[in-house]
Image (cartoon, rainbow, N blue to C red):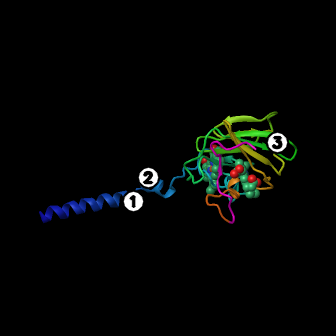
């Protein structure tokens, strides 16, 4: 009996050792929830931190240079998995140009410039392409169905909503961008 137990423990130890050595097994855990590389990753994070020409990468990852980007959430105390899809994010820039992005199923949306275009082009999956760089400051409102909210102040410089709309309301954050269900139009 004692011998059998020793054999079992030895077998277990070797299985564990084997897992620990396998990069295929350990990498997903190290990466956490984020599998970088698609339009639904990192909801609620300041997208332009990485995805701008002066972001913290030498060049924007995956060539995704974003002008404005962020995430709309469905509830006040939402965690990052409660992004709201199909919300229109309606911008007016300082020239009066209007463009409307549409959030994807993570609640993410992002705006890129494609100077070959003659009109804005909705690409799906949160992506909007516009023909010229937006001129700041920007006005923004969000809308889905009969619910809409307008940001009263303007976005002066930073294209990441999460630059100000961080997860925890406080001195340096006004809280997530969220669409109230039944919110009144202003
Ligand atoms: C901490 C850095 C970081 C943040 C923050 C970040 N991303 Fe990314 N993003 C990446 C990396 C790295 C990739 C992978 C690029 C690749 O595949 O080479 C990527 C890829 C992408 C892609 C695909 C680009 C392509 O050309 O295939 C999109 C779209 C994207 N991110 C949008 C966003 C949005 C929207 C946000 C904010 C809600 C965001 N990202 C926040 C680092 C970041
Ligand atoms: C420079 C900081 C800053 C940035 C960047 C910013 N916001 Fe705001 N936002 C605020 C502040 C402050 C308020 C609250 C006062 C107001 O309405 O202006 C607010 C309010 C809002 C509201 C109204 C919320 C309500 O309760 O009615 C919406 C909607 C909104 N922001 C959306 C966005 C979106 C979408 C983006 C990104 C495209 C964004 N904001 C970027 C600072 C910012």
Q: CA distance from mark 1 to mark 3?
A: 50 Å
* Residue 61 point in image, percent of width and height: 66, 51
Q: Which residue is mark 2?
A: 24
Is residue 185 placed above or below 20 in the rendered structure?
above
Question: Residue at position x 74%, y 39% from top?
Answer: 100
Which is more N-terminal, label 2 or label 3? 2
Q: Which residue is mark 3?
A: 132
Secondary structure beneath label 3: loop
* Residue 168 point in image, percent of width and height: 61, 60
Residue 179 magenta-highlighted = yes
Of the two numbered discs 3 and 2 in the rendering, the one whose residue sits closer to the viewer: 3
Q: Which residues are magenta?
A: 171-186
- Answer with left or right where residue 92 lies relative to residue 146: right
Residue 99 vs residue 63, the one in the foreground: 99
Q: Magenta stretch: dominant SS?
A: loop
Q: Which residue is mark 1?
A: 21
Is residue 6 placed above or below 180 in the rendered structure?
below
Judge whether residue 114 can be spotted in this image.
no
Secondary structure beneath label 2: helix
Q: Crowdedness of circle 3 by 10 Å Cα count: few (<14), some, many (20+)?
A: some
Secondary structure beneath label 1: helix
* Residue 78 point in image, percent of width and height: 57, 52
Residue 59: quarter of image = bottom right
- Answer with left or right where residue 73 lies relative to residue 1: right
The quadrant of the image that shows the C terminus is top right
Residue 162 vs residue 26, the one in the foreground: 162
């Amino acid at each position: 009996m004692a011998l059998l137990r020793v054999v079992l423990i030895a077998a277990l130890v070797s299985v564990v050792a084997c897992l620990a050595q396998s990069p295929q097994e350990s990498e997903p855990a190290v990466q956490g929830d984020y599998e970088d590389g698609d339009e639904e990753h990192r909801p609620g994070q300041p997208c332009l931190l990485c995805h701008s020409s002066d972001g913290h990468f030498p060049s924007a990852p995956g060539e995704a240079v974003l002008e404005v980007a962020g995430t709309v959430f469905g509830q006040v105390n939402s965690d990052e998995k409660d992004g709201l899809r199909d919300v229109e994010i309606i911008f007016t820039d300082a020239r009066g140009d209007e463009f409307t992005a549409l959030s994807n199923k993570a609640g993410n949306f992002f705006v890129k410039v494609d100077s070959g275009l003659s009109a804005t082009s909705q690409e799906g999956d949160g992506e909007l392409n516009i023909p010229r760089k937006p001129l700041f400051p920007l006005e923004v409102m969000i809308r889905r169905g009969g619910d809409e909210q307008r940001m009263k102040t303007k976005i002066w410089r930073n294209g990441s909503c999460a630059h100000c709309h961080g997860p925890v309301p406080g001195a340096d954050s006004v809280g997530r961008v969220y669409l109230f269900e039944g919110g009144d139009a202003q």
